[in-house]
Amino acid sequence: MVTALIPENKNSFTLKAIKDYGKGLLAFIRRRVKNDADAEDILQDVWYQLSSVVNAAPIEQTGAWLYRVARNKITDKHRKHTEVLLDDMLFNNSDDDGDDSPGFLDIMLSETKTPETEYLRNLFWEELFAALDELPAEQKQVFIWQELESKSFDEIAKHTGVNVQTLTSRKRYAVLHLRKRLKQLYDDMKDF
């Protein structure tokens, strides 16, 4: 087993790792992500993590460690892309369609308390909970835990014994249903 000892200067260790593994690691990442920008972001995260841990403990088999971190970062990136957030579901109008009407999120977060905004907030919550009641219990529960109670998938997995991928999939189906179900309300709000 080859052990890389940490030199007195952590910057020289990091620079040596970049020189020795940079090109190969970038090629490894590029093959597993959609575009070069994502690959470069992940590589930068790997170098940052390396520079963060260099002072903590020696890294055995630097190359293996770097590739393992890169693989984990790629997995994290894929998870983030597959998770659909409540913010996305709320149709906040940052689209390039030229429509400046407020989205659900704009109304929900608005500090303005007019009869109209209060009505729309109440209507949104009523429609959301009605749509949630149409879902299978597992999908409804994971959505509520994750979005309304701000629990992480890891916390939910520990609590339920269900793996994170299954939980993510359940939430995805829930959000797709909610988007479809709340689309009419959103369209009505645009004209409000």
Image (cartoon, rainbow, N blue to C red):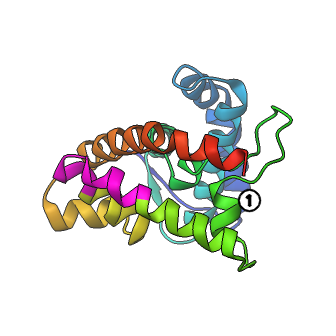
Query: Residue 11: where, in percent of width, then height?
Result: 73, 59
Query: Residue 71: where, in percent of width, then height?
Result: 45, 38
Residue 137 belongs to magenta span: yes
Left or right, 158 with reference to 83: left
Residue 1 visible (yes or no):
no
In the rendered image, which residue does mark 1 sit on?
11
- In front: 190, or 169? 190
Left or right, 105 with reference to 161: right
Q: Residue at x 31, y 40 (%)?
A: 169
- In front: 75, or 98? 98
Farthest left residue in view: 161
Q: Quadrant of residue 12?
A: bottom right
Q: Range of the magenta residues?
A: 127-140
Q: Residue at x 25, y 46 (%)?
A: 135
Residue type, numbered disc 1:
Asn
Left or right, 134 with reference to 58: left
Residue 53 visible (yes or no):
yes
